Amino acid sequence: AQSVSQHNHHVILSEAASLELGCNYSYGGTVNLFWYVQYPGQHLQLLLKYFSGDPLVKGIKGFEAEFIKSKFSFNLRKPSVQWSDTAEYFCAVNANYQLIWGAGTKLIIKP
Amino acid sequence: DTGVSQDPRHKITKRGQNVTFRCDPISEHNRLYWYRQTLGQGPEFLTYFQNEAQLEKSRLLSDRFSAERPKGSFSTLEIQRTEQGDSAMYLCASSSTGGETEAFFGQGTRLTVV
């Protein structure tokens, strides 16, 4: 069965620290990969996506993610986080028409 | 606002009552999805429409749940004889067809069954 695993449920960082959130998936076919963000009290928003081409994709707000096919991974990175990045981050894989979701990582940035 | 809209935003109901939620997708999107999200979890797929056709329904979904999209535009999700375990955020998303497409989410309906 398809699944998505996010390694950390909670991450606490200070402002200006670097961020890497892990995401691994299990699916044998061609995948489309997504990172969504949910700010407190708001709806899920797309941060970035990978469909094909350059495995290093850049998203909004300085985020980027790298698709490593051999590792079935799609880790999210940001070189210097800000307090406003406090949110919950979800990795998702498009398997046919369904999005299979990870459990999410709550990121708290200390000012 | 031309995004996905859901109504109501919050619903409190007594156990055993029926509830119905509405979703209005982005107008040009022909795919519509319903998800359920509980605290500490990612969204869980419930069902999916392409235009008015319900193409897939999660095996995990009880037969107390039913969804419709009668004209291929808005959709409704009904839960009959609600149980406390139905308390969750119900999310609607829409997307267009085509190779590189993403889902756009509404703000959700938070259901509390007391």
Image: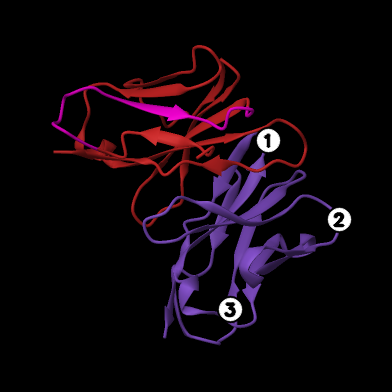
User: Which x, y percent locates residue A62?
Assistant: 65, 72
The residue under label 1 is A96
The magenta segment is: B11-29
Q: Earlier in the sequence, mark 2 or mark 1?
A: 2
Chain with red colouring: B
Q: Earlier in the sequence, mark 3 or mark 1?
A: 3
Alpha-carbon span between mark 2 and mark 1: 19 Å
The purple-coloured chain is labelled A
- Which residue in the protein does label 2 denote? A53
Q: Nearer the viewer, residue A32 or A62?
A: A62
- The residue lying toward the viewer, choosing from B39 and A88, is A88
Say which amino acid is labelled 3.
Leu
Kindly indicate whether the residue at mark 1 contacts the one at mark 2 (C-beta within 8 angstroms): no
Q: Quadrant of residue B76?
A: top left
Callout 2, which amino acid?
Gly
The residue at which mark 3 appears reads as A19
| Vertical arrangement, residue B44 with respect to residue B77, above or below | below
Dot 1 alpha-carbon crowd within 10 angstroms: few under 14, some 14 to 19, many 20 or more:
few
Q: Label 2: chain?
A: A
Residue B6 in the image: above or below residue A33: above
